[in-house]
Amino acid sequence: MSDVESRKPLVIVFIGGESGEHDISLKSGAAVIRNLPSAGFQAMPVLIGQDGSFGFPPPEDPTRFTHSVGIGEAVYKMASMNPACAFIAMHGTFGEDGRVQALCDLMHIPHVGSDVTGSAVSMDKWLTKTIFRDAGIPTPDAVLEGALDTAEDTDGLVERVEDRIGLPCVVKTTRLGSSLGVGIAGNPDELERLVQDARGFGGVMLEAFHPGREMTVSVLEDPDTGEPEALPVIEIIPSDESKFFDQKSKYGLGVTQADEICPADIPDSLAARVGELAVMAHRALMLSGFSRTDFMVDDEGVWALETNSIPGLTEVSLFPKAAEAAGIGFSELVGRLVRRAMSGPKSR
C-alpha cells in the first residue's frame, strides 16, 4: 500500500453474511470496494461467512475466505484498524435488518445507511406495509399468514385468502429480499404450493395482485444536509418467461432477464408522483443515506410494494443505474454515501 493510500480515511466494508442473499452481497461489496479508492477512501473488506464467521481478505480479492475468526476476535481486529466509517453492503437477514448496524453502533463506528430501527422495520414487509398505510402511502391489501391461524389448515387458508384479497395473489416471505420466496398464485393449488415453499424461509404474507407496470424509485440523501431526493424512475419490463421481476430476472446467469428503462418513458406527472411516494416511504420508515422503493402502476393508481434500505450495488443493480441517469457515477455515489454517514446522526 502506498503512503498516499494509507493516508486516506479507512472504510471497512461488510460483505457476505448468513442470509440467502450472501452471493449477491459479495457482488455488491466487491463493487463498492473497487470504487472507494477513487472516491478518496481506503477500503478494507470484512467478509462474513454463511456460518457467521469473519474473515479479512485483501481488497484486491475481497471474496476469498482463507482464514476465519469468531466475532470476538473480529471486533478486536476492526477496532484496532480505527476505521472512519463502515459500509454495510449486505442484503437480507443478519445484514440489512439492523444486526450489523447495532454492532457498528456498539463500536462507535459511523455506518452507511439506516440506523437499527429503520433497518429492522423496513426489512419486515408486513411492518413496512403497516407503516405505509399509516403514512397514507397506497399499498396493496394483504394478510399475514400467521394471523389467519391456518398453519395446519391449508383449506382454511385458501378460503380466507379468496374471501379477503382474492386470487391471483402474491405470496411473499416477510423478511427476505431479491425476490427470494416470492411467487404469484393463480389458483388454490398454486397458493398451497407457494405458501409451503415460502414457509421454509420464515413468515409468509399474502398480498393482493395488481397487474400493471412495474417501477422502482431510488432515493439518495444529500451528504451534507441529509435531504432525501428521488432519482430518475426506472420501469422494469420482465421477459416473457417471467411473470414478475424475480430473482432470475435480477441476477440470472450474469445477464438481467428484463428490460430496465431509465428514465422510464412515463408522463412527468406520474414520475413526480412515484418520486414523491418514494421519498415519503424513505421518511416514514426512518431510513437514512439511501433506499429504493418498488411500485406497481395500474388503472387504479400507484401501489407501493416494499422498500429496500440497502439496495443492490452490483454491476446490474437498479440503484447505480438510477444514479448514473442523474449524472452520479459509481465512485461518486459511494463517496456521497460515506460522507453522509460521517456527517451526523441517523435518527430523525
Image (tube, rainbow, N blue to C red):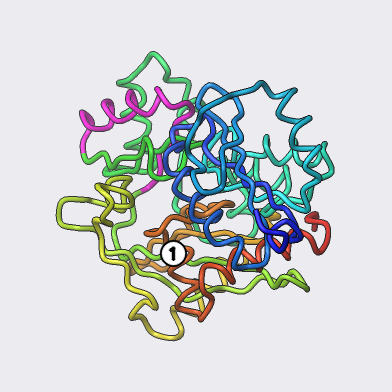
Q: Mark 1 points at which residue?
A: 216
Q: Is residue 249 depicted above or below 233 in this figure?
A: above
Near mark 1 (Cα within 10 A), the count class, few <14, some 14-19 or many ≥20, is many
Left or right: 93, with 80 as reference point: left
Position of the C terminus by quadrant: bottom right
Residue appearing at x 77%, y 73% in the figure: 224
Residue appearing at x 35%, y 39% in the figure: 182
Residue appearing at x 68%, y 34% in the figure: 99
Which of the two residues, 162 or 178, is positioned nearer the viewer here? 178
Residue extending furthest front? Answer: 2
Q: Is residue 178 depicted above or below 135 in this figure?
A: above
Q: Whole-percent x and y of residue 15?
A: 55, 41
Left or right: 118, with 137 as reference point: right
Q: Is residue 80 depicted above or below 274 in this figure?
A: above
Residue 116 quadrant: top right
Magenta-tinted stretch: 187-208
Q: Can residue 283 be seen in this view?
A: no
Left or right: 326, with 332 as reference point: left
